[in-house]
């Protein structure tokens, strides 16, 4: 990429059937690396609650924490579009409160937009934020902030009624002004139909290959989340075995320290020759 990615670039990619690449990042170092790798969008996801903070769900993540992490990511991203998740209860209280929270994210981080979960129920809120000039990425299907209401992390859209509701949610957020919508944990057939129906890009995660683009949590992509492969969700493809690599590297460091072979001369500062006064 030769210039900074904009929201309009994603809409163009949708029109030209060019796939959109999205990954999550939560700090400056990883943001810089994935930016150099050429991703289109860096999502500062509230998934940091599970992969960074070790929480069971994303619900404990606060607005202040999202602002902190997004600010760091923006410093590392020179070309990718940076979108920040709106955490639980930062937008559910209504459009006025949601707009205030989204405004804080934009003013205090330098992000290019925000993402929030919800379909028809969030349409009024999305419309208010968009009308204030803030780009919104929506999120339909499996919504992690509603995990308790959904009865767990379950694939959505398998029944006819569920499929109709996910479609209605996707249409509603487009009509409200969202520039894209994440489709999480829905059947491939449903995601394909929604992608064909909408004029805005769909970003899939566990939603099949027909979406306009794909997103993965960076820690999953790098194989950092678990040491046991069977613990990863079905939709994750690991492009590295990072957890094993980290454990191996730290073990070798520990062995070298215990054997007294680290630091060696190459990692040591010396004063050099000194004149000794007689």
Image (tube, rainbow, N blue to C red):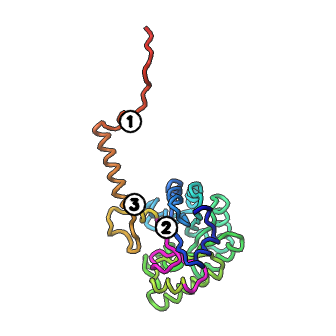
The number of discs equals: 3
Quadrant location of residue 172? bottom right
Q: Secondary structure at mark 3?
A: loop
Please rate how many residues cluster around mark 2, counting C-alpha atoms within 10 Å: few if below 14, some from 14 to 19, many from 20: many
Q: Position of residue 256 (x, y in %)?
A: 31, 41
CA gap between label 2 and label 1 equals: 44 Å
Q: In the displayed orientation, state which residue is furthest to the bottom.
A: 160
> In the image shown, does 241 or 3 lie closer to the viewer?
3
| The C terminus - image quarter | top left
Along the line of sight, which residue is nearer the eye, 183 or 4?
4
Task: Give yes or no for residue 216 being in the magenta stretch.
Answer: yes
The residue drawn where x is 64% and y is 76% is 126
The label number, if any, that marks residue 224 in the structure image = 3
**Residue 241 sits in which quadrant?**
bottom left
- Name the mark on residue 266: 1
Q: CA distance from mark 3 to mark 2?
A: 18 Å
Q: Is residue 216 left or right of residue 265?
A: right
Q: How far across and down, in percent of the image, does residue 192 sit?
A: 50, 84
Q: Which residues are magenta?
A: 196-217
| Element marked by disc 1 | helix
- Mark 3 vs mark 2: give the one in front: 3
Q: Nearer the viewer, mark 2 or mark 1?
A: 1
Q: Which mark is residue 94?
A: none
Task: Look at mark 2 in the image and give the residue it sits on.
Answer: 58
């Amino acid at each position: 990429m030769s210039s900074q990615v904009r929201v309009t670039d994603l809409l163009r990619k949708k029109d030209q059937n060019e796939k959109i690449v999205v990954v999550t990042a939560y700090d400056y170092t990883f943001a810089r690396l994935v930016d150099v790798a050429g991703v289109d969008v860096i999502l500062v996801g509230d998934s940091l609650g599970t992969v960074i903070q070790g929480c069971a769900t994303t619900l404990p993540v606060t607005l202040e924490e999202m602002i902190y992490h997004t600010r760091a990511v923006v410093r590392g991203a020179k070309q990718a579009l940076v979108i920040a998740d709106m955490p639980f209860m930062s937008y559910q209280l209504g459009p006025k409160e949601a707009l205030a929270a989204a405004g804080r994210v934009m003013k205090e981080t330098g992000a290019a937009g925000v993402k929030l979960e919800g379909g028809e129920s969030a349409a009024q809120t999305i419309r208010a934020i968009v009308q204030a000039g803030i780009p919104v990425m929506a999120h339909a299907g499996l919504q992690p902030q509603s995990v308790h209401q959904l009865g767990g992390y379950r694939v959505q859209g398998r029944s006819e009624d569920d499929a109709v509701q996910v479609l209605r949610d996707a249409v509603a957020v487009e009509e409200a002004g969202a520039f894209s919508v994440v489709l999480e944990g829905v059947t491939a057939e449903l995601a394909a139909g929604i992608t064909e129906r909408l004029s805005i890009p769909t970003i899939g995660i566990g939603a099949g290959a027909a979406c306009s683009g794909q997103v993965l949590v960076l820690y999953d992509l790098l194989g950092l989340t678990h040491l046991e492969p069977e613990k990863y969700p079905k939709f994750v493809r690991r492009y590295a075995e990072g957890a094993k690599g980290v454990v191996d590297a730290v073990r070798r460091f520990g062995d070298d320290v215990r054997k007294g072979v680290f630091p060696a001369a190459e990692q040591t500062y010396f004063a050099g020759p000194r004149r000794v006064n007689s």
